Amino acid sequence: MSAEAINDRVSLAGLEREDILKIADNAGLENAELYSRNIENYIGTVKVPVGIAGPLRVNGLFANGDFFVPMATTEAALVASYSRGSRCITAAGGCSTLLVKESVCRSPGFIFKDLSDAGRFVVWAQDQYKRFEDLTTGTSRHCRLMDINITIEGNHVYLGLNFSTGEAAGQNMVTIAAQAICDYIREQSPVIAKNIFVEANLSGDKKSSFLSFQTVRGKKVEAEARIPAKHVEKYLHTTPSVMCDYWRISSIGGSLSGTIGMQGHYANCLAAVYLATGQDVACVSESSVGVTRLELDDNGDLYASVSLPNLIVGTVGGGTGLPSQRACLNILKNAGADNSHAFAEILAALCLGGELSIIGAICAGDFTKAHRLLARGR
Amino acid sequence: MSAEAINDRVSLAGLEREDILKIADNAGLENAELYSRNIENYIGTVKVPVGIAGPLRVNGLFANGDFFVPMATTEAALVASYSRGSRCITAAGGCSTLLVKESVCRSPGFIFKDLSDAGRFVVWAQDQYKRFEDLTTGTSRHCRLMDINITIEGNHVYLGLNFSTGEAAGQNMVTIAAQAICDYIREQSPVIAKNIFVEANLSGDKKSSFLSFQTVRGKKVEAEARIPAKHVEKYLHTTPSVMCDYWRISSIGGSLSGTIGMQGHYANCLAAVYLATGQDVACVSESSVGVTRLELDDNGDLYASVSLPNLIVGTVGGGTGLPSQRACLNILKNAGADNSHAFAEILAALCLGGELSIIGAICAGDFTKAHRLLARGR
Amino acid sequence: MSAEAINDRVSLAGLEREDILKIADNAGLENAELYSRNIENYIGTVKVPVGIAGPLRVNGLFANGDFFVPMATTEAALVASYSRGSRCITAAGGCSTLLVKESVCRSPGFIFKDLSDAGRFVVWAQDQYKRFEDLTTGTSRHCRLMDINITIEGNHVYLGLNFSTGEAAGQNMVTIAAQAICDYIREQSPVIAKNIFVEANLSGDKKSSFLSFQTVRGKKVEAEARIPAKHVEKYLHTTPSVMCDYWRISSIGGSLSGTIGMQGHYANCLAAVYLATGQDVACVSESSVGVTRLELDDNGDLYASVSLPNLIVGTVGGGTGLPSQRACLNILKNAGADNSHAFAEILAALCLGGELSIIGAICAGDFTKAHRLLARGR
Amino acid sequence: MSAEAINDRVSLAGLEREDILKIADNAGLENAELYSRNIENYIGTVKVPVGIAGPLRVNGLFANGDFFVPMATTEAALVASYSRGSRCITAAGGCSTLLVKESVCRSPGFIFKDLSDAGRFVVWAQDQYKRFEDLTTGTSRHCRLMDINITIEGNHVYLGLNFSTGEAAGQNMVTIAAQAICDYIREQSPVIAKNIFVEANLSGDKKSSFLSFQTVRGKKVEAEARIPAKHVEKYLHTTPSVMCDYWRISSIGGSLSGTIGMQGHYANCLAAVYLATGQDVACVSESSVGVTRLELDDNGDLYASVSLPNLIVGTVGGGTGLPSQRACLNILKNAGADNSHAFAEILAALCLGGELSIIGAICAGDFTKAHRLLARGR
């Protein structure tokens, strides 16, 4: 986009040149081409400050080592809190992580004349699994059909197509594969659908859902740590026993409020790291569900775990190739740059750190204080 | 943060100087002070491209006029799609919007010896409303206590404190007010609590919840448009009838997947505008719920509405004062810069545009095509 | 219904006389008149065996004493299990109970031309509270309007009318009151609704809902007991510690399965007592939600509580006046016969006993054994 | 139980002999033996009036013909309403039904030392599928293991064991099979569990859950009818168009209230038929979820469907063999007596009739009137 184009846009939208320049600054004007595959109607960039949390020791299936994690946010106290939780985990020898499974869903929907046609279609579709697999592979060598869940509701049928997507988060990839399957159905199905829609909202895309929470959307990762009472005291200024009391009341609070799962503030961690590393930030909506658990163990120490079944992350595609985002991925070393499994494990580990830190702060009475000090003036 | 500090951090975290520079660039090194109230362990900024969607005509209680809305995203096709939906609404004469109510909740939790103490505490607390109001006002002249919902569960009690927060999103403000109320309770309550926690997870903070969906968290806004069939055809390349068929199958799809509410992709709109304008992006988690409704009216035209009860937005505080974020708010004119009510109405209107555009694309078979064209090469 | 009528029905439906007689038996043929206000197309009665569970010691706000509770069920082991739990509670000195609040909702729905009309209607309706109260009182001296929650969704408006209903469960009562309010609105509202529906499904009637769970539907009751470790061992053959381990895994199991609340099998208790005492058994659907909590206290004893916010019970109306049902209510003495508050507290206490017993059985490995022994031959 | 035993109980519980006799009547005292496998602490029977609804024409995969369905209830107007809906369906040529799938879940839970042990256990368990199948078959020739879903949450593991159970509802059967599998695991697993629980609440047993709603618990059945506008007018006194308006507002009402699925009052049908036919009435809790859908078709007629995924029904076991219950099953002819699939289809068809009737009544303004007339005097 040339400077003239910017001018045009300014006059079109009645924008103030001064504002445009704050957005566009040098980078903006020069980098229109850089962003051309990521945005339309480009007018510049918004700059979000990045802090790093850590060190965070992870003993995982894919991620191993001490990590510093870049977080982009404008909320004071957030990076400090995650950093504190990370150091607490590290002092305790690190956390275990386990990527359990991965899959991304697209759910085409079909409207038939009646229930009978719907039933006959399902019988036919169940026989096409091999063909659907081939069609999938034909759209991308990184995409593989892993499973189909079929749902009938009256004369409606949903195909829950579950794909693996390599190193990419994969939402475009699975759309294209699902389209290929829908096109094939339109041409080959012996039962004619009145309508075929490539996505009919039974996939959990861009929203929290019990379906994705119970299964997986993206990557499902567990993280666990055992924190000695003395480290709870040193880093979090409270005791394992009070933290467990808090876990009970806050888990039931979550249940009473009708949330999906029971956790504290995964969204803070995920939004900040997704943003820093060029992930699709809108997916915070679906990713920020899971289960946090605290227990007092027989030695009086704290057992803590998090379970995050909906991490939509990739190390290629989306915004991951843009300069500042790629640099943030590089900070994670190979875990960010070329290993989405390790990246997902680090995210779960950091969420665990964040849960420990916020629960600790609430138990110690530091929660408000932190906000008051760091956010003074606002 | 000085260059030396950056150097220190580089060596501490083992970061590559080259990566740090991509993040830090000129702005980063010079602007550490600028961001000091928004982040800790600062190392630079991440740059997210901004496009503008519009024109979007809004006939609201607070927002009136044709708006261009800045959206920050790295997902191709997104701004184009919202822009298309906005133009479709505008061609139809614009949409009506209505901010219905506003409130932000904090929910301190109290653990008592037994149910009897819990009951006695509740009786006492119900009498303290006036005092709690005064304590609230004492913490900020912008914060006002509006309502208390008390929940007993065994020997646990939750106080659902609902506040208005002026032009700020208000999460810090309500924490500080809730703390003042908790401090007062600790000192004055005739019934001694074993534990007092300033937040016990019955507030919907940073997560989707039925509680917030049914009531309000932040601002609840409605938007509605009536799109003539000819505009549906011209802008969306489909018909009102097919779009209503899609609405039914996708609403039931949402129900089957166990989502909160029924909608398509509010998260895309909210993440992009929250990011551009310095809102707390983690709140996409709680904000991206609501109800989209389509109907075929007696004239064969399309009735469309969205209902968004959890918009956490402000025009002061958080990242709203940072240069590029403030510039984006300025693009919205007074709706962004000094009127959070108008801002919320514009967000609902843009979500309505996004719902129309994506449903239209899925119905016309354009959904995959758009992704394929715009995302080519990835 | 005369014997001839029975004959007619036999021939109409092609029923076997032999089957009819098993249903009709002496009671059936003679008692048609008896049941005429409770059923249509009467052909006889189904007989469900009743067992009594207890003694159950309750130290409540309304219920006080040792109770034997009649349970009607055909599921072996059920009465035995509730009886065991009751005796365990009684041995520990009984349980505390607390009826926290009561209310039954009807939610008329209104469709308007557009959002603007919906908004104007709401403004008008908010001013009619006093009038709605009077209309309510006019329909029944037992019915009182307690609260209205208004919800706007596009051009739809829901009035959440919350009533108290005296000693009756009250579903008919609130329907009649809501109808009177709707009739008034139809005649007096300055804004014309396209449709008025006396119930639009925002009331939680006959289904589990987060709305009713979070607030109240019918009566909300808490029950709590502290069971010494020795009684856990004697009655339940396990330890408080294992039971708390079970509570954690099963509460998270409930969350993972997407239930409303976290509990074991309230439905068993409620179905059996509702049936025995002439309550509306279909309301088991909405009543069987709540929160069970177990904790290990500092002395190594077991703290246990249940919270049941949706008990739809009455001591008049429905089937409560029929002979065998009334007799079962009488077994509960004044708690059943003329005190729905005490009745609700006893139900909560019995649910607590049932939770203790089933969790104990699962922890001790007795769960399957009980079913195997008692259900042998099936 | 002898008369002396009754006397004992009377004195023990302080019961009034007069009440006992109303419950016990002739049947009660003589039939203690009859009910000995179904109840403990037997004191007599409760009598619930039975009415029959129909004729209901079903064109199903398993059920075919015109059926009269026995319903046991004490709620006036209920049988009349279901009968009206049934006749409306029959007049329209009947409804299609389709039993889609069946399965009953038990979900043993395992607590391990840590996440690593949990992971190793899962790897081992995945290899035992054949063995688990054999163990299942060994417990009952009617029980078959169909599928296992494994869930890891920290150091907790849940095995979602899905069984088919022949003609029985199967809850005891699956408990015994799950126990056999747990016993085997306790003996053979190379990874030692700290605790093994035969059921850890991830099965949807005795409660509504999104898990069961999305998959199946018991039997999943669809039913569908197309009702000509003239029959809507004749039987329901309203129009398809108004009924569709109602469907929209009430479906969204359901979503706003946080229910699982979207439907009106399945619970009424299920409670009444479960009760009449000796099913486990407590399962109304889990069975009363699903999706009702209404549409105006191109001819101006009404398309209506119901989807009920959680029907827990059997024709053997539980109370199905007791005299009056068996007689009610016989009224359904082979559909009740020896064909649980046909029985389930009839239930879905009757639920469809009930949805049509209640929605018709609400749309025509008859809903309150019916209650007022039939329930007069209460």
Image (cartoon, coloured by chain):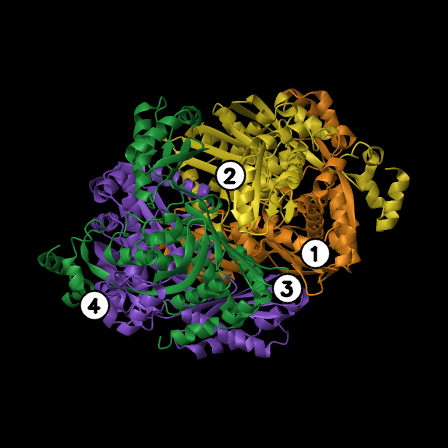
Chain colours: A green, B purple, C orange, D yellow
Picture quadrant of residue D3: top right
Q: Which residue is mark 1?
A: C240
Give the residue displayed 36% in from the left and 21% down from the top.
A190
Q: Are marks 3 and 4 on the same chain?
A: yes
Q: Amino acid at mark 1?
A: Pro
User: Is disc 1 surrounded by few (<14), some (14 to 19) or many (20+) residues within 10 Å?
Assistant: many
Verify CB contact (< 8 Å) between mark 1 and mark 3: no
Mark 3, mark 2: which one is toward the viewer?
Answer: 3
In 3D space, how far apart are the residues under numbered discs 4 and 2 (Cα atoms)? 59 Å
Q: Disc 1 to disc 3, how far (Cα)?
A: 18 Å
Kind of element beneath mark 3? loop
Q: Say whether mark 2 and mark 4 are on the same chain.
A: no
3 or 4: tag closer to the N-terminus: 4
Q: Is residue A325 left or right of residue A4?
A: right
Q: Are marks 4 and 1 on the same chain?
A: no
Amino acid at circle 4: Asn
Q: Is residue D267 left or right of residue B137?
A: right
The residue pinned by badge 4 equals B26
Q: Are marks 4 and 1 in contact (CB under 8 Å)?
A: no
The dot on residue C87 is: none
Instruction: Provide the chain ID for the residue under circle 1.
Output: C
The local secondary structure at tag 2 comes to strand
